[in-house]
Amino acid sequence: MRFAALRAAFVLLVLLPARAAAGLPVEKVIIETRHGPRIFQMEVASDDASRAQGLMHRTYLARDAGMLFDFKAVVNTAFWMKDTPLSLDMLFVRQDGTISTIAAQAVPYSTAEIVSAEPIRAVIEINGGLAKRLGIAPGDHVEAPIFPMRR
């Protein structure tokens, strides 16, 4: 009986949050840095419900994974980490696909607002500290279907 209860708890804590995100489209996103391209497979949150859910309740994010929040317009926005147990780097991306600012290592469960410094088109969330480790910096260009191709 004890094993069944543990198994049920595992399903609720681990598998259900992963399934909830399974319905989001996944796209290849490339961030062009001074040190070369950094390639990710990102879930795309492009409606109010998926943007509100984000990466809440996730306990694991693969190193080459992340989430791209597409606002479909240029907006001023703010995020928080209230129900998010992972530390995340938030990359605020302009309409032209360049990174405006990076909020590094957002604190899990914090209700402090993380505000875009200027109007942006999208936000990318990756594992906390990964932007620094990979050399991702403001001014780098993001290649994704929502951004124009660089010439």
Image (cartoon, rainbow, N blue to C red):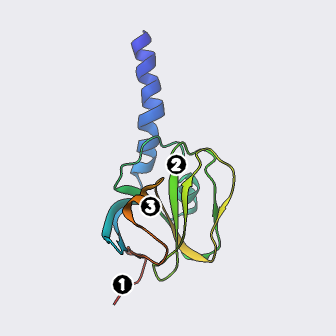
User: Looking at the picture, which amino acid does disc 3 mark?
Assistant: Lys
Numbered circle sitting on residue 149:
1
Q: Are marks 2 and 1 in contact (CB under 8 Å)?
A: no
**Disc 2 to disc 3, C-alpha distance:** 13 Å
The answer to whether the residue labelled 1 contacts the one labelled 3, judged by CB atoms less than 8 Å apart, is no
Q: Please provide percent x and percent y for residue 53.
A: 55, 52
- Marks 1 and 3: which is nearer the front? 3
Q: Residue, x 52% and y 70% (percent of image)?
A: 122
Q: In this orientation, which residue lies closer to the viewer: 41 or 20?
A: 41
Residue projecting furthest to the right:
112
Label 2 belongs to which residue?
A: 87
Q: CA distance from mark 2 to mark 1?
A: 30 Å
Name the N-terminal-most of marks 2 and 3.
Answer: 2
Element under disc 2: loop
Mark 2 surroundings: few (<14), some (14-19) or many (≥20) residues within 10 A = some
Between 11 and 28, the residue placed more toward the observer is: 28
Q: Is residue 121 left or right of residue 116?
A: left
Which residue occupies 39% across, 14% down?
3
Does residue 105 appear anywhere in the picture? yes
First reached walking from the N terminus: tag 1 or tag 3: 3
Local secondary structure at mark 3? helix
The relative height of residue 83 versus residue 121 in the rendered view (above or below) is above
Tag of residue 14: none
Q: How many marks?
A: 3
Identified at 31% across, 64% down, the residue is 39
**Which residue was labeled with disc 3?**
132
Identify residue type, mark 2. Ser
